[in-house]
């Protein structure tokens, strides 16, 4: 028999901070682009398109000695019909040396903070340092995590527009986020008014399950940085594909983003090629440049990598052992 440490959402809230997760994910990106980590093929299935899907992402970090996977289920009508979140899942971490599982962690807490960290890293290396105004499209958990990540690397942000289709959710978002960031002005924006707000923004963040683009090419001004977070499945898209050939493209994983990320449509149509895309790990390592001018439009396509989950889970497990947090289950 052996023991597995189980960490639920409340445990993880005690163990993880955004700044620490940014550092862990940044290291994972660099290791991946440096061939010290790897990904296995993504498993995805839509039971009902746009309503129910399942995703499994897995990989390994050689330097840390851990492999693992995350399994996530999405049911769009869960909040309305069942009063439970639309997303749920688990992260399972294994020792490469022994082949045994060492931890099972709440997948949504890990997902939210590591994806917020991914957006932070994209902005850290690609957004203008004087950025003050942000448009966030998506008022859910990830819309909150993205702001938390941005504020950790760009404390000069002073105005955040949040757009969505449900006025009640937008009002709740503004109320909650205003209480957490006293020096930032939050404003709710209906989806039919995002053209003007997009053009005013230094950074645009998209974190929705959309299958049709809602940010048009002509709405994006020179110098803007875009964090494209939502597209992580074939058919998903948030940004006008006609914009992509004219801007700087950076991916978390080049091959993955061309297959199922924001760049998939432009790639399939022949508007961009693999050689047009840098990886964020290459920029972190210094083998590719970051932002090249104040006028450059940049896009970071964060499709989500199992390495982010494994690195974040490893950080939580180490701290849990040190602090005696979590439950030990005999297997």
Image (cartoon, rainbow, N blue to C red):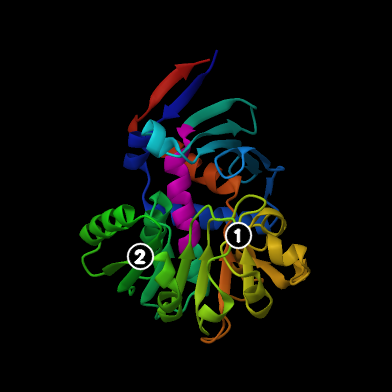
Q: Where are the magenta residues, as a range?
A: 105-120
Q: Main secondary structure of the magenta part?
A: helix
What secondary structure is found at the residue carrying circle 2? Answer: helix
Is 69 left or right of 268, judged from the image as shown? left
Circles 2, 1 touching at the beta carbon (< 8 Å): no
Alpha carbons under labels 2 and 1: distance apart: 26 Å
Q: Residue at x 65, y 69 (%)?
A: 241
The correct choice, above or below, for 16 with respect to 265 in the image is above
Q: Residue at x 58, y 67 (%)?
A: 239
Q: Tell me if residue 60 can be seen.
A: yes
In front of the other: 65 or 282:
282
Question: Any magenta on residue 35?
Answer: no
Q: Residue at x 60, y 25 (%)?
A: 100
- Give how far across and how far down residue 221 sits, in percent: 51, 83
The correct choice, above or below, for 211 with respect to 287 in the image is above
Please name the residue that numbered disc 2 is placed on: 151
Q: Residues within 10 Å of mark 1 (few under 14, many from 20)?
A: many
Q: Residue at x 32, y 40 (%)?
A: 14
Please name the residue that numbered disc 1 is placed on: 237
Quarter placement of the N terminus: top right
- Give how far across and how far down residue 268 sits, in percent: 76, 62
Figure quadrant of residue 129:
bottom left
In front of the other: 50 or 56:
50
What secondary structure is found at the residue carrying circle 1? Answer: loop
Question: Any magenta on residue 115?
Answer: yes
Q: Residues within 10 Å of mark 2 (few under 14, many from 20)?
A: some
In front of the other: 315 or 165:
165
């Amino acid at each position: 028999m052996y023991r597995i440490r189980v960490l639920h959402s409340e445990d993880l809230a005690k163990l993880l901070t955004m700044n620490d997760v940014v550092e862990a994910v940044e290291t994972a990106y660099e290791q991946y682009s440096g061939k010290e980590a790897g990904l296995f093929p993504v498993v995805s299935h839509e039971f009902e398109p746009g309503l129910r899907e399942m995703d499994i992402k897995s990989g390994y970090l050689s330097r840390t000695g851990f492999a693992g996977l995350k399994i996530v289920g999405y049911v769009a009508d869960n909040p309305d019909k069942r009063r439970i979140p639309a997303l749920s899942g688990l992260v399972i971490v294994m020792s490469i040396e022994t082949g045994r599982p060492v931890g099972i962690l709440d997948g949504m807490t890990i997902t939210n903070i590591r994806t917020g960290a991914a957006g932070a890293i994209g902005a850290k290396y690609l957004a203008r340092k004087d950025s003050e105004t942000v448009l966030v499209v998506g008022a859910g958990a990830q819309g909150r995590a993205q702001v938390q990540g941005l504020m950790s690397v760009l404390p000069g942000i002073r105005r955040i527009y949040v757009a969505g289709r449900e006025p009640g959710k937008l009002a709740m978002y503004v109320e909650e986020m205003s209480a957490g960031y006293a020096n930032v002005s939050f404003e709710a924006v209906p989806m039919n008014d995002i053209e003007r707000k997009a053009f005013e923004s230094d950074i645009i963040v998209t974190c929705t399950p959309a299958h049709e683009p809602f940010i048009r090419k002509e709405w994006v001004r020179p110098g803007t940085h875009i964090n494209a977070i939502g597209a992580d499945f074939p058919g998903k898209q948030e940004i006008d594909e006609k914009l992509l050939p004219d801007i700087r493209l950076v991916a978390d994983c080049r091959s993955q983003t061309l297959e199922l990320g924001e760049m998939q449509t432009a790639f399939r149509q022949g508007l961009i090629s693999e050689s047009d895309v840098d990886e964020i790990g290459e920029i972190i390592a210094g083998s590719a440049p970051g932002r090249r001018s104040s006028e450059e439009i940049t896009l970071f396509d964060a499709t989500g990598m199992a390495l982010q989950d494994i690195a974040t889970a490893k950080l939580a497990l180490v701290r849990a052992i040190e602090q005696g947090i979590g439950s030990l289950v005999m297997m």
